[in-house]
Structures are given as C-alpha cells and as structure tokens.
Amino acid sequence: MARTRAGRRDGHTDPHREQDVKMVLLCLCLTLCLMLTLWSWVSAASPSRVLKLRDTGGKLAVGLGDTLGVVRISAEKGVRIAAPNGRILDEWPRTVRICAEYGEGLRPPSVVWRVQIKAVRDEGAALALRQQVESDSGVASYVVYEEPWYKIQVGNAADMEEAERLKAALQQLGYPDAWITRVELPEETMGTEDPGDELFFRVEDDSGNVLLFVDEPRILIEPLDGHPVTVEVPGSPPRSYRGQLRLSFLGQGKIQIVNIIDLESYLYGVVGAELYSDNRADLAALAAQAVAARTYSISSLGKHDSEGFDLCATVHCQVYQGLGRESALIREAVDSTAGLILVYGGRAISAVYHSNSGGATAGAEQVWSTRYSGYLRPRLDEAVDPNTNSVVELGRDRPGYSWEVHWSGEVLADILRRYLKTELALSVSDSAKLRDIKIAKQDDLGRVEKLVITWEEPDGEEVSQREYEVIKDKIRWVLRQPDGRILPSTRFELQVQTADGQVHKVTALGKGNGHGLGLSQAGAVHMSRLGFGFEDILRHYYTDVDIVKLEDYFQMMETQLAWERKGIVLNWTAVLGPEQGVAEVTDVLAWSPDGKSVAFATEGSEGGLWVFDIYTGSLTKVLAKPVVEAVWKGDGSAIAAVTQVDENGYQQLMVIQMAPEPGTAAETDSFSAAVVAEGFDVHSPIWLADSDLLLFSQNGMIYGTMDGVSIPVITGARTPAVSSDGRQLAFSRDRALWFYQLATGTAVKVDAVGKIDALCWSPDGRYLAAAADQEVVIVSTAGEILTRFHGWSPIWSPDGGFLAYVSEQPAGKAEVCIWDLNSQTSIVLASAGTDGVRRGVHWAVSGRQLVHNIDGRLHLLAW
C-alpha cells in the first residue's frame, strides 16, 4: 500500500497533482492486495484425494524435477523398465542411460566425435571422474571399457567443429589433457527392429550403445531385488531413492523424473533433509518432525496434480533428498510414529514448520493473507525445564536465534527499489531518494506486521513524498539483505541513521529464522534434550490438535465424501472455546454481510454479544448483556439484538452501531447502543434490504422502527421475514403462514404449519423455511408444503440449493445437517451431545462459510 503527499518546495500544495498521484497509487494498492491474496491461498486435499492414497497402498508420486538430456540410472542388481500398463520392456544387470528422443530424424549417428579426458585402469575411479565431468560440464559423459583401460569420454558431437568447441570448454573447466576421438557405434546397437515414427525414449549403456527404443511416452523403472535406484542428471550430484522411478516424455528432449514411493519411506528422506541429527537425545524432535511432515504430506496431496505428481522435492513442498539424508535414528523416529498425523476441526492441518522462532511463534494471519488459524497461534516459545523447574526460552542456543543485518543508505535504496517492484509490482523511480524507513506496527511479541518506507522525489519546483506500506511476511521479501537473501524473520527492531534528509545507514537487530509458524525445529531439539516427548513438542507448537492414526483419518474422509459430492470440501476450520476465552456459546449466530466477521452470543458470567474477525483473529465484546437474537444490518454498520433484561422475560431490542465511538478502542463500552423497543415477547428483528427500517414482533404485532420512531405495521402477526428483493413479506398468525406481496397487496395463507418460531426466505424468493414445533417446514410461495422434517434453526445457502439446520437425535445428540433442495436428502455435517443447550447454525452470504455451535463451542468452516 502507498500514500502520497505532494507539494511545492515553498509549502503550497497542488491539489490536482495530489489527486492524480493518489489515484495511481490506489490502483497499485489494489494490485498489491490481489497479489497477497493469491499468493497465500492454500486449499486442503479433498476427501477423495486422500482416499486415493489409501487405495493405492499409500504410494506417493514425488516430482524430482525435469531435465534436458540424459538420465543415468543404476541399481546394485540392475534395473527393469516397464510400460505404464505393467508390460516388461526389458531388464539389464548394469547401468542404463535414458535419453529423450526428438524424433526419428535426430537419432544419434553411427559415427560421433567425443572428447576423451582420461583413461584409467580402475573402474571406480573412472565412474567417479565421469560423474565429476558431467556435473561440471552439464554434457552427457561415458565410460568405455577397452581392456585394460576405462576411457572417460564426453559428448556426442556430430562433427569435428562441434567437438573442438566442446574440447575448448572442457579445458577451461580444468581438463587440460582433453583430446578428440572418433567413435563408431556398432550398427546392431541401433536396434534390430524398426522403431516406428513416434519415439519417446532411447535406452543406452554407459558406452553410448543403444539398447532399446521405447515408443511409450511414460516408462517405469524399478531396481531388481528391491535395491535403491540411483539417479544422475547433468549438473547435479547423484541421489539414491527407494521405490520406483517414473519417467515422462515432455517433448523437445525433456524428461520429467518422478519417484513412486510409499509414504513412510518418503518420510525417511524428508526428515533427514529437514532436520538431520544422529544424536539420540534428539529422537523426540525427529519424531515430532516426522509427524509434522507426514501431516503436511496428507494435507498437500495433489498440490502438483496438474504436473502429474503429488508433491515436489523442494521447499515449495518439503525438501526430499532420498537415501542420502537417512540414518538409523531417523528411520527409528519415522517408524515409531508410523501413521500418526495432526488433525484440527476434522481435517489434517497444514503442519508448517521453520528453523528457529527466536523466542516467539507467529499466528497464520500475521504471516499470510489468510483467515485466522486455530492451530497456528502466536505465543512465547518457552517451556519449563523438568530438571530445574525453571522457564527456559527454547532454541536460544541454536543457530538462527539472533542476527544482525547492516545496510548503507545507497545499498538499501537499491534493494527496496528492486524488490518493491518484483514482489509487489510497485515502481519507485531511480531519482527518488530514500527519506525514511520505520516500523509502523508490531505485535505484543515483537513481530513486525507493517513497515512504512518513505521516498522523496523532486520535480522542478515541487517535491512529493510517497509512503509504501509492506505487510506481513512480504516484509522479509522486500527488506532483503545486502546479498539479496530474504530477511531471516519479521521479529526485529530497526536503527535508522539519516543525513541531509536521506537514510544514511540502517541496522536490523532480529531474532528467529523463518516465517515463525508452527514447529520451531530449534525449539523441538531443545525440548527433546530437556526430556519432553514428541507429543509434548507437537502440542506445544500446534494448538488444540488431535493426534490420530491415518486409518482413522481415512474413515473420517469416507464420511466427508458425501460432503464433497455436494461441493463442500473444507479448506479452513476454526474452533473457539474456553481456551480462546469463549464459553457457553448459544444458538445466536450471525455472519456479517461481508463474511469477514461473525457475531455470536454467550451465556454465563461473561455472557453477551461478541464479534470475531476471521482474518485478524480479534475478538470483541460489543454488548455485555444476555442476547437471544441478533441480526446484521445489510451494510454491516449495525446489529439489532434482542436482550434478556430479567428472569421474568422482560426484553429490550437494541441497535448497536459497529463503528466504535471516535477516539476509543474497540471495547464493550465504546460501541453506541440504542434501545428501540422493550417489554415482553420481543422477537424476530429483521432489517429491510438497503434501508434503515427495522421490523420486529411484539405481543402479536409486527412493528417497524426507524430513527427512534416505532409504528405498528400488521396486527395479529408474528415472525416477520422479508424476501431478499424486498417484494415479499411473510409472517405467522394462529399457526398458519402468510405470504404478502408488498407491491400488490395479494396474500396467500398456508394452514397446518404449526407454531412458527422463525422464518427464512430462499434467495430466489420461491420457498420459505419455517421453524415450527421442532420441525423444519419447506413451503412454496404457491402455498404448497414441499416437505417437513425434524429440526430447527433453518438457514438457506445463498444460491438456494441447500438448507442448513440443526436436528436433535436420540440419547441427547444433536446434528448439523445440510438438506439438498434437488434431491430432498440430508447429510450430517457435525454431531455432538447437546447437554441441554440449544444449538444453531448460520450460512454466510458468500455461500462458502458456515458457523455452528454443536458442542457449545464456536465452529467456523469454509470451503
């Protein structure tokens, strides 16, 4: 975000120039907001995707990368190549090289020129040198055996001119004895069968002799006798992997390499790459890392489906390096937690982790442009040492706990100018001078949430100042270190020195390494060495999670398959209960019109009306009185609430203005509230669309109130409900339902509905859901009762296709259900014991968010 102040050097402002600049920067701000939103959006794996893992025997497809050229593959007993349908193409007891074909016209000629760099008698030395030169040059290299020599040769040049260029390049790389040799590839190695017109792969031996042409675009390679398979590509070190390899032809000589491996074996390579240790005192930390990595894998399944695999092997998913980072201790850590994952709100969590918290973790909404996370919360990263009973700061003695970064003013200006552009699409001209940089907002734990950068740009007689705001984790990506690396963390203080109106020198004194979310690897190691178990570590870093077995999670996903068929695939849940300061939630639930906040009521000593912001995580008590009904005004500026004044049933209808009084913080006493009606039997408040008119019912009469004046509207009527287009009014009278057309005055009566407690219009105005005598009754505007079933608290989805409601079951159990208008069937979304408390549910205007209180806590869901 950016703000601009433009003015003349003599202090007079140019209003037209200022307005133009503000408009330009407003567009830039919108771009910034869009980028942040898209960058942070994460969708959880669907139930069907999770169950696919079960049905394939727990096999993952891990993308190892793409390569152009040759893939060298070996295993101790040799390898077998098969087609995707399982048909065996061939097997060899030695190393093979897989090349992607460009087409029949570009097959390797029978005569090529190679550059030989050396000949040795030892095969192992020859293979090591071949690997080294291939890594240095990025060119396919070979070992050709002619007794007693192993000759190391590079390339397959089509002519001497190409070979000379390759020779010169190799000499510059440190191979001075390189010389050119002519190599004849025997005709029989070119294949005895006609390879056809469409070739995808060519299989060679280590001397470059062709063993096989493959007309399949995808092949599977597995080691014989179950040994690991080793992969080498030009420019990278060899790595060994468990399981199989899948090679896919991508065109133009490019090959995609995927490791097909079972989940637990995959974790051996992940845990070792992310948190390697051979110290037995770190076993609990490694076990915690294994559970976190397993959980992250489950929640991220299908992250790369469009590319043909589940997860990649980089920091974009989780670093995975195969056998190279395994150890007996790491395998023990993975095996001891086999199948365990972390679940919150019925879904596997996004179990992110980082290197070192620097003394305090972060909340998800502080780092990414995302909703509040109930399991990723900011907190001091400390624990009680069981040996001394003293509080210790975790990870303090580990690498990354504290750091310093220094910039000169000129270097910092260049860095900020460059990365404001690349990260946030905000342009700063080369003539602009860096006037100031300051921390504008920090949380209570010292994490920077907003950074303001001020630039000054002279323009003749005028000078303009522009302030750019950088928020959340993007601060690390814009305020980079002098060498271009991102800032270690956002937990820092700034020391700024200025001279002649410009920034001269800046120092950042910080703590922590990484985004600060979830498990701190340094803290986990510290806790492990203090004697804590892996479950203690996980519950310390992930709040309110359950540790469940994978087979149990599969059963949970079986249940949620029914939701998925209705288009409900949860990607976010949050639960607020006593630990979050929320107790005894009632059935008074109401989403704000913009879907960013939810109002709810609580009972008990701390009872009242609360508003929870799902993006900032702020929880504000707006009314300190028992509330039995609440409804938002259409523009979100006010809430109408019916309060219970005393035990005799005396009530008040209050209108609460949601903007705090000027100059006050958002606390209970700062919200203006006016009583617009009071007495007995006050209920069913509803705002007229795009209006300040509030309807409500009292003592068998429907009233309208506006600007402090209330007048009767309909006599002998209760429970008013207005359709979304404002053209139809529904109400109840003597156990009957009435439809009233406001434009024509036409009325339709529907008998035998029951004692109606509440009414809810479908968005298209065709149906009405009535809560009557512990039943939900669906009635059409033509007067036909479509269906009725046991339940209460009905609320339509914004598209009108579904109805959410609460149903009480035998043995004191309540369920939140979704009823499908088309099929007229219901699915269960949540269930719990009622404990005698009435439950409720409410659907957000967006149609993709629900709130319910099935177990007395506040449950928020989004999909």
Image: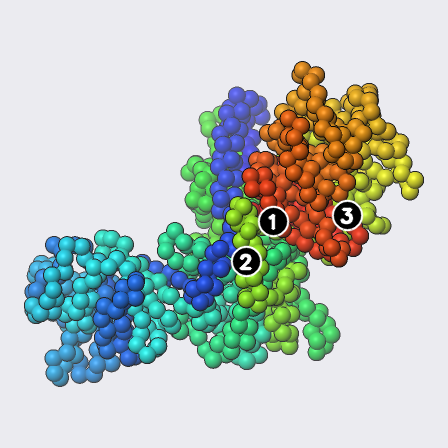
- The tag on residue 702 is none
Disc 2 to disc 3, C-alpha distance: 29 Å
Q: Position of residue 547 (x, y in %)?
A: 61, 66
Residue drawn 55% across the image and 39% down it: 822
The residue indicated by pointer 1 is: 827
Helix, strand or loop under label 2? helix
Mark 1 vs mark 2, CA separation in Å:
13 Å
CB within 8 Å, label 1 to label 2: no
Sequence-first tag of 1 and 2: 2
Asked if the residue at tag 3 contacts the one at tag 2, i.e. Cβ–Cβ closer than 8 Å, the answer is no
Image location (x, y in percent) of residue 130: 22, 72
Estimate how packed mark 2 is, as few (under 14), some (14 to 19) or many (20 or more) residues with alpha carbons within 10 Å.
some
Q: Is residue 109 visible?
A: yes
- The residue wearing badge 3 is 838
The residue at which mark 2 appears reads as 558
Q: Name which quarter of the figure residue 772 lies in.
A: top right
Q: Secondary structure at mark 1?
A: strand
Residue 451 appears anywhere in the view: no
Mark 1 Cα within 10 Å, few/some/many (few <14, many 20+)? some
839 vs 530, left or right, is right
Q: Which residue type does callout 1 highlight?
A: Ile
